[in-house]
Image (cartoon, helix red, strand yellow):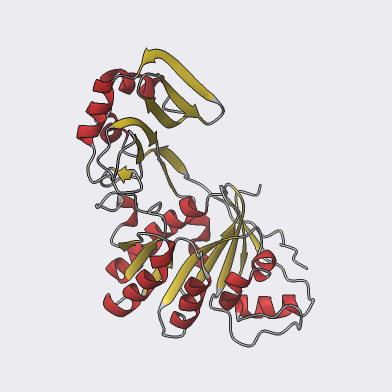
Amino acid sequence: MIAPNLVSLPMEGVHTEIDGLDVLLERLPPWVQDHVLEYQEDVEDVVMDLGSPLAFNLNKGFVAFDKIVEKTDLETLKYALKDVADDGRTGIDGTLHRISVVRRRARGSEGTIIGATIRVARVTMGLAEPLRPYLEGGNFLILGPPKRGKTTLLRDIIRIISGRLGPKLWVVDSSNEIAGFADVKHWMLGYARRLQVPGPEFQTQKLTEALANHSAAMVILDEVKRLPDAEALESGSKTGVNFGATCHAETFDEALERSVYQPLFGNVNLRERIKPTRSSFDTIIEIKDWGKFVVYQNADEVISRHIAGETVQGVQVGAWS
């Protein structure tokens, strides 16, 4: 049983804005720029399909405009892009914006662009500040369901830790969401270094590269996706290198029930209530809502007590009041 206590720390100075708005605008046709500025508080995606009205996906709903997207509009966008990958995605150096293209039916990646979705990224600073006391050392694991803000929080944590570790902090960017899709990493990573991951099957390899080749003092993995990822983290945690990672789970007891994560928690066997090895993490952070966290320190002890049937308490941190 898990019952967070009522200790709460304040969260102040959180700031969110469109990431590199000027850099994004200069890649769009002038008339599209005007509409982005008009809806900059709410726009999430700019949707451009040849022969169709320009449309925006908003925080709530969508909006469509009278003007039709023409071939010249997409050509303007095309000339502003570089290195569109085989999956149809590219980014803008130093930003988090993602541009995904739609091509005319053709072999390979040489088909004419007939549409595009431009994800208008936002950057948040200060979200992790209430967690700073829990990030001074050791390994941490962030838990939360999809769309709860794990990547946003992790990016701000990297900003904090990079000030202490500099280039000895390595980020294995699972989906290129932490540092962006382009070659130049996002500025929030500070002095931290980044390894891009071509696909899920390469993530364990990139994690091993960070450990073996680059003198990492700490490695942060955006998302544990497969059992080999968890096993590599478990093995690496015994080498003296610190780790941080995220997992898809509402709570740590939910994560315990998923076999892919069990190496992270000491290879726990819930049926027999045993934990043969130590947990790979010292601190577990559950994201409950925007800016609201429950933190469990001494994670190995907490997990042992939990599987023994004891009630364990986390600390409420952030904007709870």
Above-or-below relation of 83 to 271: above
The foreground one among 107 and 315 is 107
Above or below for 312 versus 185: below
Q: Residue at x 41, y 28 (%)?
A: 47
Q: At 75% across and 82% down in the image, what residue appears?
A: 273
Q: Is residue 36 left or right of residue 184?
A: right
Relative to 10, residue 68 above or below = above
Occupied quadrant, residue 160: bottom left
Residue 21 image point, x, y percent: 32, 33
Q: Position of residue 263 (x, y in %)?
A: 57, 78
> x and y percent of residue 73 in the render?
27, 23
Q: Residue at x 53, y 78 (%)?
A: 280
Query: Residue 242's x, y, as percent?
Result: 43, 76
Seen from the viewer's position, the closer of residues 240 and 268 is 268
Q: Picture quarter containing residue 176?
A: bottom left
In this view, the residue farthest toward the top is 66
Q: Quadrant of the N terminus?
A: bottom right
Relative height, residue 230 to residue 195 (above, below): below
Q: Is residue 86 visible?
A: yes
| Most distant residue in the bottom direction | 276
Left or right of residue 201: residue 185: left
